[in-house]
Image (cartoon, grey):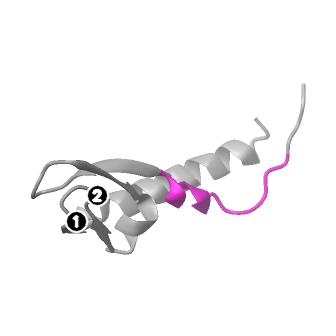
């Protein structure tokens, strides 16, 4: 059995990308969690419309915090 010590933050999760549909042309555009957390604007790769990214009720931020805490607990246990 191997043991690995993981240090640092799991904030790299914010670099994870997923697709969102453009409200104008419905073409999917890739955005990162970081952009959503910053309430940034993505540009549609099809019609070049600005897509305002809103984290409704902080759901994405809560999900990142919970996952970060869960991963932290997992690695503290030495698994």
Residue furthest left in the image: 24
Q: Is residue 26 magenta?
A: no
- Residue 34 position within the rendered picture, expressed as x and y whole percent measured from the top left: 45, 66
Q: Nearer the viewer, residue 50 or 17?
A: 50
**Quadrant of residue 63 in the image?**
bottom left
Q: Are marks 2 and 1 in contact (CB under 8 Å)?
A: yes
Task: Indicate whether 32 appears above or below 54.
Answer: above
- Residue 56 position within the rendered picture, expressed as x and y whole percent measured from the top left: 22, 63
What is the quadrant of the N terminus in the image? Answer: top right
Q: Residue at x 78, y 58 (%)?
A: 7
Badge count? 2
Quote the CA–CA distance across marks 2 and 1: 6 Å
Residue 45 is tagged as 2
Task: Indicate whether 69 appears above or below 53.
Answer: above
Q: Name the residue that disc number 1 marks.
A: 48
Is residue 5 rendered to the left or right of residue 18?
right
**Quadrant of residue 41 in the image?**
bottom left
Q: Residue at x 23, y 55 (%)?
A: 46
**Quadrant of residue 22 in the image?**
bottom left
Q: What span is in magenta?
A: 5-16
């Amino acid at each position: 059995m191997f043991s690995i010590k993981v240090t640092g933050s799991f904030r790299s999760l914010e670099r994870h990308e997923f697709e969102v549909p453009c409200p104008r042309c419905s073409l999917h555009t890739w955005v990162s969690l970081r952009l959503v957390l910053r309430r940034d604007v993505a540009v549609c790769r099809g019609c070049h419309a600005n897509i305002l990214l809103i984290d409704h009720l902080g759901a994405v931020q809560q999900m990142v915090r919970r996952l970060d805490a869960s991963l932290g607990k997992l690695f503290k246990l030495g698994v």
